Image (cartoon, rainbow, N blue to C red):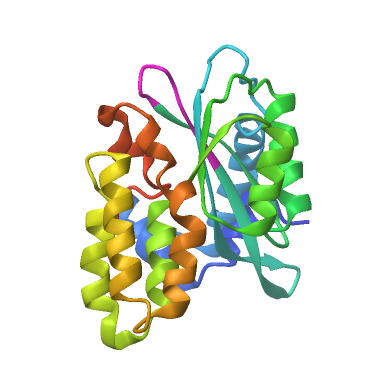
Amino acid sequence: MLSLMEMVIQGVSTRKVTEVTQELCGAEFSKSTVSALCKRLDPIVTAWNARPLRDTRYPIVLVDALVIKIREEVHVRPRGVMIATGITAQGQREVLGFHVADSESEASWSEFFGRLKQRGLTGVDLIVSDCHGGLVKSIRTHFQGVLWQRCQTHFLRNLLDAAPKSVTQELHGHLTAMLHAPDLDTGRQIEQHILTDFAKKAPKAMTVLEEGFEDAMAVMALPESYRQRLRTTKRGTTQ
C-alpha cells in the first residue's frame, strides 16, 4: 500500500517532480528513490499532523481547501486537502494540520474540526474561510459564538463571476474601495452606491453583494492593524 506522501507525490506528473527535485536539490531522483523517501517521511508527517495543540492558544484560525490529484492503485483521482492555519496572540502563523477527503462536505469539515479540537484547539475567537455551504455549517456547529470572516478574495471572485464581463473591470474598482474602506459606515455607503449603480447592469452580482456584505466586512470590528492580514485566507490581498 502506498504511503500518504507517496500517494500525493505520485499523483503529480513526473515532469513536475523532476522540476521540484532539480530546483531544491540540484539533482534528479528515480521513482524508486522518491518512493523510498516518501515511506520514510510519511510517519514524520503523520506524527506532526497529530501533535498536541494544547500548549499554544490560537485566537484566529484560517481554513481553506485545495484540490490535488492522488494516485490510488492504478488510478489518479482528485481529492480535497483541507488546511487550517492558526495565528497566535503574538501574530505568528502556524499550520495546525491538514485533512484529505473525497469532497468539501459538511461531514468532511466536521471530521477535520473534530480532530483539531481533540488535539487541544480551544479559545478560537475568529475564523476566516470561504463561503462553502458545508464549511460554514460545520464552523457554526464546532465553533459556536465565534466571529466568522468571509474570505474577501473568494467574495470578490464570486461577485465578479456573477457579473457580465462588460462591467467587471469597473465593478472591481468599486468593490475594492468598499472592501478597503477605513470604517464600516464608509463601507456601507460605498455598498449602497454600488447597488444603485449596478442594479440593472449586474443584478446577480448585486444579490451576492447584499447577501454577503456583512460577513465579508466582519473584520472591520477588529483594530485596523489586524485587518489587512485577516481579510482573506490567501497570502495576497483583495486588490
Please check the rendered image and state whether residue 209 is part of the magenta-colored stretch, yes or no.
no
Q: Residue sitting at 37 percent across and 77 percent down?
A: 199
Figure quadrant of the N terminus: bottom right
The answer to which image quadrant residue 143 occupies is top right
In terms of depth relative to the viewer, which is nearer, 57 or 5? Answer: 57
Q: On the picture, is 73 further left or further right than 208?
A: right
In terms of depth relative to the viewer, which is nearer, 191 or 41? Answer: 191
* Residue farthest along the top direction in this orientation: 55
Residue 33 position within the rendered picture, expressed as x and y whole percent measured from the top left? 54, 55
Figure quadrant of the C terminus: bottom left
Q: Residue sitting at 72 percent across and 35 percent down?
A: 142
Visible residue check, residue 162:
no
Residue 193 position within the rendered picture, expressed as x and y whole percent measured from the top left? 27, 64
In terms of depth relative to the viewer, which is nearer, 21 or 137? Answer: 137
Range shown magenta: 84-92
Relative vertical location of residue 11 with respect to residue 191 in this rendering, above or below: below
The answer to which image quadrant residue 218 occupies is top left
